[in-house]
Image (cartoon, rainbow, N blue to C red):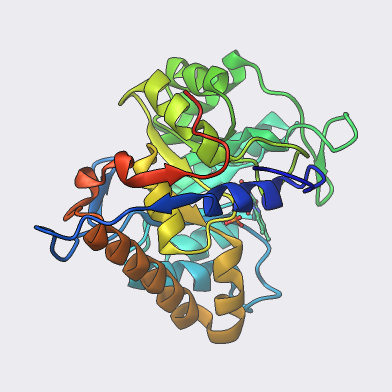
Amino acid sequence: MIQNLHGDSDLITREYFDSILLETRLIGSDLADTHVSIFGKEFENPITTAALSHLNSHHPEGLAEMARGAKAAGSLVFIGMGEPAETARVAQSGASVIKIVKPYADEDLIFERLDEAKRVSCFGVGMDIDHTFSRFGGYDNVMGFSMNAKSEADLRRYIARTGLPFVIKGVLSVADALKSAELGAQGIVVSHHHGIMKSAVPPLYLLPKIRKAVGDSLTIFLDCDVENGFDVFKALALGADAVSVGRAIMTPLRENAAQGVCDRLLEINGELRAAMARTGAKKISEIDPSVLHFFGAPKAE
Ligand SMILES: Cc1cc2nc3c(=O)[nH]c(=O)nc-3n(C[C@H](O)[C@H](O)[C@H](O)COP(=O)(O)O)c2cc1C
C-alpha cells in the first residue's frame, strides 16, 4: 500500500511500479521481438526519450547528443522546451523527433515553435498542458516565459496548425484523455511531469482506465519514474503503446554522451525482452496483462 510518502508523486509512482509483480510463462515461449509502429513508422523498440530540455550541463550538445544516442538505439525522441536553433540541431541527428511546445501565454511564440518543428521535419509536435499552473495557484513561469490556460479552441488551433501528429502531454485523467481524442490529437502522454503536482495518482494506475475509455483512437505514451525494462513491460501490459524515459538517461548522457544514452536505452530494451520472453510474449501485441499481480493498490477499473 502507498504509505508515508508525504504526497511525493515520484515516490508514490515508484512504489506503485514496484508493487506490481510478474508471474512466468516459459513453456512454448521464445526470444521476443520489440518492434513497434508509432504513427505509421517502425521503431526497433517502444522506448522513447522523455521530452527533456536544458541538458547542456550534461553535455555541450545537450538534446542533440541525446537524440543521436536514441537514434542509434532505434528509439523515437521527444524533446521539450528550447530555441528553434536547438530543435534544428536535434532534427539533424536524423532521429524521429516529437517536439513538445510549452503552453506559452504568447500565441505567436507557440506558432513559431510549431512552424519551426515542421520546417526542420520533426515527426510530430505537441504541448505539455501540465505546465500551465504554478505550484502556488497562478500561471506558471518557466525560465522567464509566462504560461497561460489553454481552451479547447486553442488546442484545436494548434492541432490544425502543422498537419503533423499532435501529442497532448500531461494527461492524468480519463476526462482529459477523452477531450484530447475529441479535439483531434493523435497521441497523449500520461504523465505527472516528474511530480509537478503533489499527491498525483501514478500514471500507471490510471492507464488501463484511460485505454478502455479511448480505445484505439489515441496512441498512448506513458512517462514518470520509468527506470528499467520491467517498468516498460508493466506499462505496455496495462495499455501503453510506448514508454518514455527521462531522468534515467541523463546520467548516462553526462558520463558517456550519445553512447551512454544508446547503451542505457538498449539495456532497458534488453530487460523488456527478458520480461517478454519469460512471460510468453514473442511480440509486443502478445503481452498479456494477466501475468501481472497487484500487491499494492489494484489497477483502476
Ligand atoms: C531536466 C528536465 C527537463 C524537462 N523539460 C521538459 C520540457 O521542456 N517539456 C516537457 O514536456 N517535459 C519536460 N520534462 C519532463 C519529462 O518530459 C518527463 O515528463 C518527466 O521527467 C518524467 O519522466 P522521468 O521520470 O523519466 O524523468 C523535463 C524533465 C527534466 C528532468
Looking at the picture, how far across and down is residue 73, in whole percent? 34, 70
Residue 32: quarter of image: bottom left
**What residue is rendered at 49% in x and 33% in y?**
299
**What residue is rendered at 62% in x and 51% in y?**
15
Looking at the picture, how far across and down is residue 262, in whole percent? 41, 75
Looking at the picture, how far across and down is residue 120, in whole percent? 43, 53
Report the side of 278 relative to 174 (left or right): left
- On screen, residue 137 above or below 53: above
Q: For the N terminus, which image quadrant? A: top right
**What residue is rendered at 22% in x and 62% in y?**
277
Residue 40: quarter of image: top left
Nearest the camera: 275 or 215? 275
Looking at the picture, how far across and down is residue 160, in whole percent? 45, 24
Nearest the camera: 120 or 251? 251
**What residue is rendered at 42% in x and 44% in y?**
293
Observer able to see residue 111 = yes
Report the side of 118 relative to 4 (left or right): left
Residue extending farthest to the left is 28
Nearest the camera: 283 or 103? 283
Report the side of 57 relative to 202 (left or right): right
- On screen, residue 297 above or below 68: above
Total numbered labels placed on residues in the image: 0
Observer able to see residue 122 = no
